[in-house]
Image (cartoon, rainbow, N blue to C red):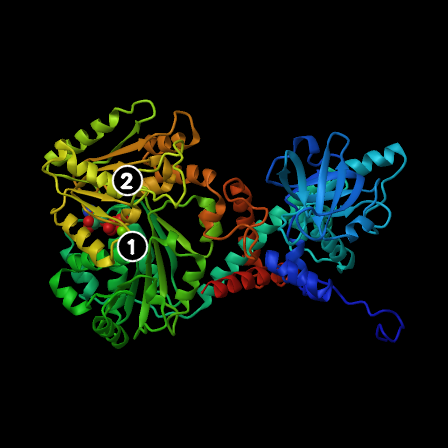
Amino acid sequence: MTDSEAGETPRVSVTLDTKLQNVVGGKTAVALGKAFGVETVGDLLSHYPRRYARRGELSSISLLPLDENVTIVAEIRSIEERPMKARKGSIVEVKISDGRGILSLTWFNQSWRAKQLQPGMRGMFAGKVTDYRGHLQLTHPTYKLFGPGDDDEPEMPTDAAAAKLWIEQPVAIYPATNTVASWQIAKTVELLLDSLDSVPDPLPAELRGERGLLPHGRALELIHRPEVDSDWRRARDTLRFTEAFVLQSALVQQRNAARAQEATARVPAPGGFLDRFDAALPFTLTDDQQSVAAEIAGDIAQTSPMNRLVQGEVGSGKTVVALRAMLAVADSGGQAAFLAPTEVLAAQHLRSIVRALGPELSVELMPTLITGQLPVAERRKALLRTVSGQAHIVIGTHALLGEKVTFFDLGLVVVDEQHRFGVDQREALRLKGAVPPHVLVLTATPIPRTVAMTVFGDLDVSTIAMLPEGRQGIETFVVPLFEKPGWVSRVWSRLAEELALNRQAFVVCAAIAPKQLEEGEIADPEAAAPADVETVLAELRRNPVLASARIEPLHGRMTSEEKDQTMRSFAAGEIDVLVATTVIEVGVDVPNASAMVVMDADRFGVSQLHQLRGRVGRGGVPGLCLLVTTAEAESLARERVEAVAATLDGFELAQVDLELRREGDVLGLNQSGGRSSLRLLRVATDGDLIGEARGHAQRLSDRDPLLATVPALREAVRRRLDDSERASLTKS
Ligand code: ADP
Ligand code: MG
């Protein structure tokens, strides 16, 4: 017997995967979709409240912040409608009070408000606070009335005890937009919770029991409709762990799926390219280089694709290790693609690879550059060499991922400086060859373990911790201009001393040119503009202590030929000082560069400063880094600069950075509510939790690779992977 035969309203089964528009009105579904990117019931139910307020104590009228969006619980005192003075039409003005202050609400040409609202009604009123002739008001606010006439809000109870409960019950406040108010979300969520079928648990029962967590459906209920504060706290703990566990299970699955693919095994030929390269290598690999090289050689000799991340400080010798893997691939007849984050770096990699290979191997392996800016004829030639398989090493930016570039036999993709390439680009890469290539990711940004697990959870990680011998290290000093404004001239004489030893230097600025004021704009004397390349360049060229120095600019407004030319001259020692923006941040390798001055160091991130500093002290000469700042002692900005000066340990600094930045930046994901973003997890603070979840996910997957015993987890993982796939599609 079907439902309709029973003569009842057919009850549609509602699950987390049900489309929103099948449960709530189409209009609501569209509005929510636009505002938050939610499509399904599950999506909206994981749009968790941002915080919880109480009916009795939201913003207080007497303390309203101007120009901010507020939600106030208050009672209507009076309603007045009057014609506008200057224009046609009428104004409805309503006065509300929370017992401590009075606030006006105004609407233009909406007479019906005067009929709907009555003195004595209570409700929540939301809008932006403006100042109209010295009186605070909300113009065209939205509101939700309590009590009679509103079926979803329980009437305010009359007996004191019940009233106290009613007032103290936490009210979920959702991340809202100007088109969808918090209580509109709350109302839709209520509807979903009321019609939702029982929700299966993505956590295996024994794991849930062991950690004392709530059943999933109960947790969803309590995070949205708590009765007391402890409700949402418990719900949050459950959902946070669930989020970590589902994410880690998804990564473990992804990793297993990647490994299950067929790849071509790449084994170096005796007496081949790799052997010849090794025989000519002018140094011995460090122990770390050797063990990482062995891991890579082991990986690519398999018939499943390598997915490995190699992290190591700037100058630790990652590129050599990667090059050896490329040669092993070439030995087996295959090609390697080498991706750099910028065209300058791609060109520099080509030069250093040609240099490292020597003339003979270079002719045979034909390292080839493909960038978006190559002249047409050259580009055609490069593409031809690539498709024919003549070029065994192809170097470029992510333009190499473009559809026009076809490889004959792509065996290995090396991504240099991964942090600029997101998870999605990595996925696109894997789909590039007919047979998936081996993938090697290099990064000089030390990645805290939890970030590695969250962002690179599908990769195996190797670390080169030691630097080759003979490195002299870097000394770092903070130059605090706030206390010692005169020290700036000492900076330039110190720079001159370095140059006198036949060394070279960088001066890094946060801006290219002085800030242009907009027409009519008045310069704010408080807001000091950052030192810029143009101004500093002119000053240094005028400075008598640097009279004999050759000083040139390098910044992003130069064409890539100009930048390239400048870098080449600098590398050749024809330029003494480069005044540059952060275009020099990554990978630039000039062993004779010994000194770096960073102007307004407090304007840069901790990891960025560390990266910048890695440009000096790369050869046999000791490095010197001067971090110039006007930030006051003990300010947060100053603390960051001091942290960089205090240690050369990139891992430590990465952790500092992580704590200071929003995870969104760390993850390369938008965290503010996109479908595949993190919700309750914070990589900076939930490290232990993530680690535990990883362990559980791994053990479960070992026991039950298809997750057959926990169907709800399988579904949750599928949703998670679908989401990231969709996110990558919308980005490309
Ligand atoms: P990374 O890519 O990690 O920044 P590179 O591979 O570019 O480092 O190496 C930096 C410099 O150190 C290069 O000039 C390289 O030739 C040199 N180098 C690499 N490994 C060693 C080693 N084991 N001993 C001496 N020099 C090395
Ligand atoms: Mg490098």
> What residue is drawn where x is 49% and y is 45%?
663
Extreme-front residue of the structure: 86
The percent coordinates of residue 147 (x first, y second) are 84, 45
Please state if 75 lies on the left or on the right of 348 as rendered.
right
Mark yes or no: residue 707 visible: no
Query: Secondary structure beneath disc 2?
Result: helix
Image x and y of residue 584, in percent? 27, 47
Occupied quadrant, residue 720: bottom right
Numbered tag placed on residue 293 in the rendering: 1
* Secondary-structure class at tag 1: helix
Q: Amino acid at mark 2?
A: Arg
Residue 288 sits above or below residue 4 on the image:
above
Q: Nearer the viewer, residue 672 or 316?
A: 672
| Left or right, 327 with reference to 643 | left
Which residue, given by chain and number where applicable, does mark 2 sit on? 613
Which residue: 44% across, 58% down?
423
Quadrant the C terminus occupies:
bottom left
**Looking at this rendering, what residue extends furthest in the top direction?**
483
Crowding at dot 2, Cα within 10 Å, few <14 / some 14-19 / many 20+, comes out as many
